Image: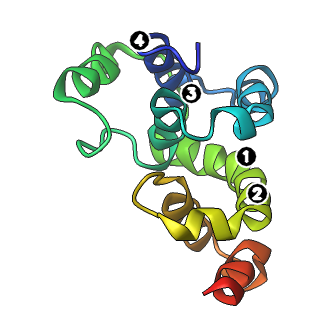
Amino acid sequence: MITNKIAHLFIVHILNNLDDTVMSKKKILSDVLMTLEENKNDESFIKVFMGIFCPNNKRYFTDDEISAFNCLKEHSTSKKDDKQRRLELLQIVTGPLEKFFDENMLWYLMDTQKNPLLARTISSRIELGNAKESDMIDEMFRQI
């Protein structure tokens, strides 16, 4: 589902609406993160992360996709604030993504326009704090 041009949108929707982020981590994100190496350049796969990093961003999602994400949102039974859910999801994915980029930094620095995950992972670390302790950011500066 994470590499399917339509099904990945369902995953994005579930991640951004399911209150139980622990369940999202165990049932969805752990499997997604395990396939990072093999799917790192797949557009649909990348959009799963973009849905966490910057939901409803027109740079990554079409108007129709954004409309579908927000459809019937006013009837949601969610008890968790969208911002809080997003921060919890960021905490889940940022560490594993940092580790991946730390190990593959040189390849990603050669062409940062092809894959937006590196830039979004860095901005996520800054948003969550502790950027000074990030091995990935240290590695990026060493490579530069």
Could you say where residue 10 lies in the image, as x and y percent from the top left?
48, 14
**Residue 92: mark in rendering:** 1
Is residue 38 shown above or below 86?
Answer: above
- How far separated are the C-alphas under marks 4 and 2? 27 Å
Q: Name the residue type under label 1.
A: Ile
Q: Residue at x 45, y 37 (%)?
A: 51
Give the amino acid at mark 3: Leu
- Say which element carries label 4: loop
Work out whether residue 65 or residue 86 is closer to the camera in this orientation and state it.
65
Residue occupying image coordinates x 73% and y 61%: 104
Q: Gap between marks 2 and 1, in whole Å?
A: 7 Å
Is 52 on the left-hand or right-hand side of 129?
A: left
Please identify the quarter of the rendering in which residue 103 is found: bottom right
- Are the two marked residues, 4 and 1, in contact with CB atoms closer than 8 angstroms? no
Name the disc covering residue 95, or none. 2
Image position of 138 with respect to 73: above or below:
below
Tag 3–tag 2 contact (CB < 8 Å): no
Instruction: Give the mark, 4 or 1, whose residue is nearer the N terminus.
Output: 4
Q: In screen coordinates, is 123 left or right of 75?
A: right
Q: Which residue is mark 4?
A: 6
* Label 2 CA crowd tier, 10 Å (few <14, some 14–19, many 20+): some
| Front label number (4 vs 3) | 4
Of tags 2 and 1, which is closer to the observer?
Answer: 2
Q: Earlier in the sequence, mark 3 or mark 2?
A: 3
Q: Residue at x 20, y 20 (%)?
A: 64
Q: Which mark is residue 15?
A: 3
Q: Nearer the viewer, mark 4 or mark 1?
A: 4
**Which quadrant of the rendered structure holds the C terminus?**
bottom right
Mark 1 or mark 3, which is nearer the start of the sequence? 3
